[in-house]
Amino acid sequence: MEAPDFKDFAKSMVDYIANYLENIRDRPVLPTIEPGYLRPLVPERAPERAEPWTAIMEDLERVVMPGVTHWHSPRFHAYFPTANSYPAIVADMLSGAIACIGFTWIASPACTELEVVMLDWLGQMLGLPEQFLARSGGEGGGVIQGTASEATLVALLAAKSRMLQRTKEQHPEWTEAEIVSKLVGYCNKQAHSSVERAGLLGGVRLRQLRPDDRHRLRGDAVRDAIDEDIRNGLIPFYVVATLGTTSSCSFDALQEIGEVCRERGVWLHVDAAYAGSAFICPEYRYLMAGVELADSFNFNPHKWMLVNFDCSAMWLKEPRWVVDAFNVDPLYLKHEQQGSAPDYRHWQIPLGRRFRALKLWFVLRLYGVENLQKFIRNHIAQAHLFEKLCAADERFEIVEEVIMGLVCFRLKGSNELNEELLKRINGRGKIHLVPSKIDDVYFLRLAVCSRFSDDNDIHFSWQEVKDAADEVLKTHKD
Ligand code: PLP
């Protein structure tokens, strides 16, 4: 393809994208196709001869859209949001054009340097302690990981290498394998599955601790578990505190947990994947009190801060525990300025990395902190509107305090009744929700996800839930 065609193709695609997003509310949120729907719609083999770009445009509605779940529809309330905005889309175009692989500073200095500065901007927006920021002139700094799962794993590996070194100093007679076999980490039973997975990938045991009756991991539970394990000859090395659990958006008691970790010399990682975006609003920062006690902190601007996937922001106070521990330095990756700026390849699992800081830069500049705060507050207000509508209907109960943009609710009655309710809601095809279960209580989660969502959409979704409940309760009466 030559430049004139590229310009026409890209302009046509931009029109298509804007039309798609601005009218997304009118599309059924869930596709109604069956597995295997797509193969008959495309040829058996790749074309021998080049096609015109217009042929692709013609196929989008025929081949792709029937199988798309519209995550940005205001009718989409499943999981947690994934972010989307025009500035981020445009930034990804530029990133695709520059198409550098910024594994070291020299591999594309702007890619590294913009990331360092953006993580400082973002860290200040959240009110993170200076120790986490590169601008402090200390060791700390931020990095963009692909996902929160990678951040949790990187933090675990850093904690592991720190504890290995400390233990080797105290017990030079122990082998590395012996030490690793004694390492144990901790998290809330309600922590995301990626935390358990990080333990598996890191080859260490991870204990899931029981939270309190509001599903928050408390300091006492962590202290008791750590002390019990020390008595049994194990070596506690890592704790994950979750701020905004996936199952019900509850917040672990960070201050309490942080104090225990500091007393026992254990690495504390904060997983605020979804809720972290809300800390750009000062009124929600009480939920991260104690963050100064953490060793690493992570949240996903790609969930709730209008930066398209993938953009998971992570800060470390002492990145050397990752950088030095996994430093493999072949000649072809060396450069003369090594040490004067981060070589981000050492901060992450893969070698290659895209120019992701561009989309953060574009979003922060073109929205401004003020509009990002408005966006968050607006979503939380919509969640409270749904909560109010639901609480006013005596057939329903709210099962968790609504703090962010997630409402956890159920019909009063059995789990089976609520399973049926969810099936009806999704079966009617107008809105999409997923369930959750805590301590054998099954409930529905309604997340406010779309940047297009407004109060009318919430009323629409509530009407759908109510109508589905009418149908379910009627069949139970008959
Ligand atoms: N942690 C929490 C609390 C989450 O809610 C999620 C996803 O929803 C994750 C981690 C995993 O996020 P990612 O897909 O970025 O790995």
Image (spheres, rainbow, N blue to C red):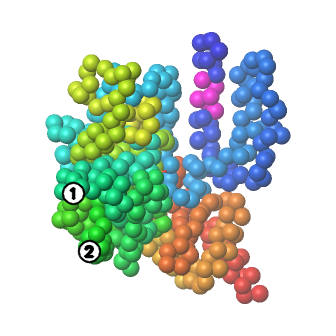
Residue 26: x and y in percent read 66, 49
Type of secondary structure dominating the magenta stretch = helix
Outermost left residue: 137
User: Quadrant where the C terminus lies?
Assistant: bottom right
Can residue 110 be seen from the camera position used here?
A: no
Dot 1 alpha-carbon crowd within 10 angstroms: few under 14, some 14 to 19, many 20 or more: few
Residue 39: x and y in percent read 80, 40
User: Quadrant where the N terminus lies?
Assistant: top right
Rendered view: 405 above or below 102: below
Q: CA distance from mark 1 to mark 2?
A: 17 Å
Can residue 408 be seen from the camera position used here?
A: yes
| Location of residue 432 (image quadrant) | bottom right
Outermost bottom residue: 477
The amino acid type found where label 1 is placed reads His
Rendered view: 268 above or below 413: above
Residue 171: x and y in percent read 21, 57
Which of the marked residues, 1 or 2, is nearer the chain's N terminus? 1
Q: Which residue is mark 2?
A: 231
Q: Nearer the viewer, residue 462 or 179?
A: 179
Dot 2 alpha-carbon crowd within 10 angstroms: few under 14, some 14 to 19, many 20 or more: few
Q: Which residue is mark 1?
A: 171
Q: Are marks 1 and 2 in contact (CB under 8 Å)?
A: no
Residue at image location 33% in from the left, 63% down from the top: 182
What's drawn in magenta, residue-wise? 10-16
Residue at image location 18% in from the left, 45% down from the top: 130
At numbered mark 2, what does the secondary structure look like: helix, strand or loop?
Answer: helix
Is residue 70 found left or right of 282 in the rendered image? right
Rendered view: 211 above or below 367: below
Q: Nearer the viewer, residue 234 or 84?
A: 234
| Location of residue 421 (image quadrant) | bottom right
